[in-house]
Image (spheres, rainbow, N blue to C red):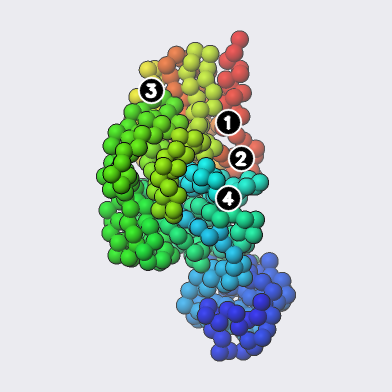
Amino acid sequence: MKFSEFADILPQAGPVPAGVEISGISSDSRRVERGHLFFALAGTRADGAAFASDAVSRGAVAVVAPKGALKDDPGAPVLEVEDARRALAFSAARLFPRQPATMVAVTGTSGKTSVASFTRQIWEHAGLAAASIGTTGVVAPGRDEYGELTTPDPIALHRLLDELAGDGVTHASMEASSHGLDQRRLDGVRLAAGGFTNLGRDHMDYHPTVEDYHRAKLRLFDTLMPKGAPAVIFADDPWSQPTEAAARAAGLDVRTVGRHGTFLSLKRVEHERHRQRAEIEHAGTIFEVDLPLAGDFQVANALVAAGLAIGTGTPAETVFKALEHLKGASGRLELVGSAENGAQVYVDYAHKPDGLENVLLSVRPFTTGRVIVVFGCGGDRDRGKRPIMGEIATRLADVAIVTDDNPRSEEPASIRAAIMEAAPGAVEIGDRHEAIRSAVAMLAEGDTLIVAGKGHETGQEIAGTKHHFSDHEEVRAALAERRP
Ligand SMILES: CC(=O)N[C@H]1[C@@H](OP(=O)(O)OP(=O)(O)OC[C@H]2O[C@@H](n3ccc(=O)[nH]c3=O)[C@H](O)[C@@H]2O)O[C@H](CO)[C@@H](O)[C@@H]1O[C@H](C)C(=O)N[C@@H](C)C(=O)N[C@H](CCC(=O)O)C(=O)O
Ligand SMILES: Nc1ncnc2c1ncn2[C@@H]1O[C@H](COP(=O)(O)OP(=O)(O)OP(=O)(O)O)[C@@H](O)[C@H]1O
Ligand SMILES: N[C@H](CCC[C@H](N)C(=O)O)C(=O)O
Ligand SMILES: [Mg+2]
């Protein structure tokens, strides 16, 4: 691709001749190849500007950098831009030009993975070639791959979208994490609609305040979506109103869903243990939907997904039929097994205060015995959530077992201590394998056990090493041990 093809993104009046061939782009000097444009980004741990000369010595033809970032001459032309991350994302979109024709993104503290998956499932049910991209990876026809990030970096993302479009995928739903939005990973994605689930405490290690965190989420609506596009907003969250106001101010077509929703209005829900019957009003018609999922919050997620599918052209009747066939995303209040006395064991990905509160509240109505929870908090992540989650677990569960969940570079015992401080009566068992065994061993008739925090994850990261660990496998093994 010729340099001139980036004319609307990168400054042209400079020392890079318009005809120069650009072979690729990179924001990591270690990945630079001959003919690349190198983007020097200021990060959380390093400053890409420090690697500009390294990039040039590996063959970069020019360096794109924020104004004033480069103090020394890297040995190749420097192109200064206002927002280097945005320029990177748009350049990636130029280099990998194809995208599924109908792209939607969903943001919020909890429920993104579920909504992205549900939206894909609805589209599949409608006979469309659909994909979803998020925490649990990429799912598309003939493809199911695990990825490291919830929202991939812009180069990986645009390469992926181009590939999916090439494979014939016409519809794709993706998760927009606050990191992803803030770091402009999705800039350049041509969005047909956007969704919002809720806002709670999360990533306070990255965002200075909840308001700042909310502002990062709002970029989806006020910066990335085109005017007039449907913004599907869950209406029953404390942050629904400010989100709605921002979306309206940005000229979007706001469609609210939930009990207070007007586009999809939830009239009634009857909860059963493993399913729920919902009455949803849409455009003057009441639809009765038998949702095959446990957990109050899954109704909210299903409504946002339904709103996105209807908002992008799938007929409402088809969408509501599809809801009756939804499968939960792996490790989202997933029933993994039962003890011989009927006590049930769920694996859930709740690893933040709101998620934990929700999941414990969701199982209470169907638990005639005790609610038992096994959970921990990740190392090198928001420390403030530890006592909050300790308090929630002891308030809402009858037995709380505090264990390890990816301590990463931190001392595991000190993470547990911070949780225990606010969790009077909780039991501390550091080794997650032992914690799950003890919890399963104590199950009596009518009890429900929630193993929270890891969901689909298959590793336990301790001091920089990732050990294989699966809550699903551990629960099954512990249940098998109980059998005579
Ligand atoms: C804190 C964070 O979000 N970091 C992400 C960010 O890295 P960064 O820009 O801060 O990188 P940095 O290490 O400070 O380096 C700065 C720049 O120097 C460059 N560099 C560095 C070294 C070198 O030798 N040469 C070089 O060029 C780097 O490539 C980078 O461009 O941009 C990178 C590329 O997009 C990401 O891989 C990286 O994700 C890290 C691995 C991460 O753990 N991110 C998590 C927190 C995250 O993003 N999570 C969200 C939300 C999860 C959820 O709630 O579901 C997600 O979307 O996954
Ligand atoms: N709408 C919701 N409201 C509150 N809690 C929810 C909701 N949806 C899911 N949860 C809880 O959050 C957990 C994670 O759900 P999900 O993976 O769908 O969210 P996410 O936003 O993708 O999370 P992450 O940012 O960690 O990837 C679930 O296991 C459940 O405990
Ligand atoms: N995407 C989130 C997942 C956290 C899951 C939990 N198991 C933990 O390790 O804290 C993160 O990396 O912060
Ligand atoms: Mg997710």
Q: Residues within 10 Å of mark 1 (few under 14, many from 20)?
A: many
- In the rendered structure, which disc, 1 or 4, sits on the residue that comes first in sequence? 4
Q: Say which residue label 3 marks.
A: 366
State whether residue 249 appears in this view.
yes
Query: Within the image, what quadrant is residue 22 found in?
Result: bottom right
For the residues labelled 2 and 1, the Cα–Cα distance comes to 12 Å
| 263 vs 330: above or below | below
For the residues labelled 3 and 1, the Cα–Cα distance comes to 22 Å
463 with respect to 220 (left or right): right
**Quadrant where the image shows the C terminus:** top right
Q: Amino acid at mark 4?
A: Ala
Q: Secondary structure at mark 3?
A: helix
Q: Residues within 10 Å of mark 3 (few under 14, many from 20)?
A: some
Residue 165: which numbered mark, if any?
A: none
Query: Which residue is found at the position 52% from the left and 17% from the top?
Result: 339
- In the rendered structure, which disc, 2 or 3, sits on the residue that comes first in sequence? 3
372 with respect to 18 (left or right): left
Q: Nearer the viewer, mark 3 or mark 4?
A: 4
Q: Say which residue label 2 marks.
A: 459
Q: Nearer the viewer, mark 4 or mark 2?
A: 4
Q: Say which residue label 4 marks.
A: 129
